[in-house]
Image (cartoon, grey):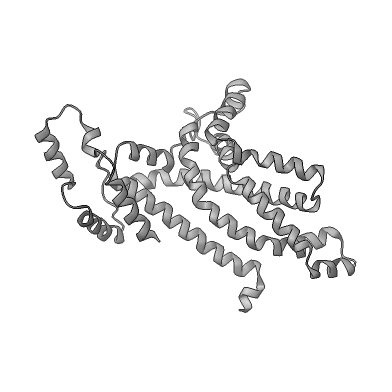
Amino acid sequence: MIVFASALTFFFVNLAPGGPASVMRFDVTAEQRDALIKAMGLDRPVPERYVTWLAGAVHGDLGSSLLTNEPVTSRIGDRLPNTLILAGSALLLAILAGIPIGIVQALRRGSAVDHVLSFVTAIGLSVPVFWLGIVLILVFAVSLRLLPSAGVTSAASDTVADRLLHLVLPGFALATTILPTVVRFVRSSTIEVLGEDFIRTAHSKGLRPRTVITRHALRNALIPVVSAIGALVPRLLGGTVVTEAVFGWPGMGRLALEAAQGRDYPLVTGLTVVVAAIAVLASLVVDIAYTRIDPRLRLA
């Protein structure tokens, strides 16, 4: 999957009109531009350049940025922690809020509470994240002055508390993009489990409703939810592009935007490979989590 994603990205970015030389210098002659393209190795066939790049990538060398001449691994390494913090916080927030909301909706199916919660969580699917981000900045940063509007830390402070304050708005905005999916999966899965025979047996034994939900229903209902959460990781990483641009968050999303605008082929390809690797790792974690949640898989 990683090799396929890198090959697809490499070939498609090279089909883009122009090239790195066309955006780096506007005052050079045609001869100087040709010499610059040759020095970058862009005069060679695309398949030949990809094979050379892949050979280096296997050994951890993703090439050098065409715009800054820095190693791609260094540029990504500087931004990757910030993106992981942002995406991880948004995912954690969506899980912590989505599971209780989904359970409440399942227990109150068809009631006014169910309809209201469905309407509120659906906002994340209907409202663009860039619009929501701007509204959050105007309300909480400009009007109320409760939270910072951009960046990772303040210029005069670099404490854990300060970093958490900077994380609140972008983390919340990004979490709204996946919260409705988590809620819907939890709701539908819980409703299905509540109708199983073993749930009725647990009630007939005189167990308290809370015990039946937490020990019997919830554990079985989380099995498809874990799969859905694993599938949300690539979408979450894609959403960081807009979120980081709105909140000035120095992560891989902004770096990808800069690389695309500058037609920095090695950097775009390197970012794609990293995202693909994270998606594969998330799939692996989901498979491992299955064996912990469902004892039938361990027996199999």
Q: Is residue 137 above or below residue 265?
A: above
Labels in figure, total: 0
Pick the front one: 198 or 57? 198
Q: Position of residue 5 (x, y in %)?
A: 37, 56
Classify the position of the N terminus by image quarter.
Answer: bottom left
Question: In the orientation shown, which residue stands out farthest toward the bottom?
Answer: 300
Residue displayed at 32% across by 56% down: 7
Left or right of residue 10: residue 240: right
Quarter of the rendering containing residue 297: bottom right
Pick the front one: 29 or 250? 29
Q: Position of residue 44 (x, y in %)?
A: 16, 51
Q: Is residue 112 above or below residue 59?
A: above
Quarter of the rendering containing residue 217: bottom right
Residue displayed at 57% across by 45% down: 89
Left or right of residue 219: residue 300: left
Q: Position of residue 100 (x, y in %)?
A: 72, 50
Q: Position of residue 267 (x, y in %)?
A: 32, 46
Residue displayed at 49% across by 27% down: 156
Classify the position of the C terminus by image quarter.
Answer: bottom right
Can residue 16 be seen here? The reply is yes
Residue displayed at 25% across by 61% down: 55
Can residue 71 be seen here? The reply is no
Left or right of residue 112: residue 76: left
Question: In the orientation shown, which residue stands out farthest toward the top?
Answer: 143
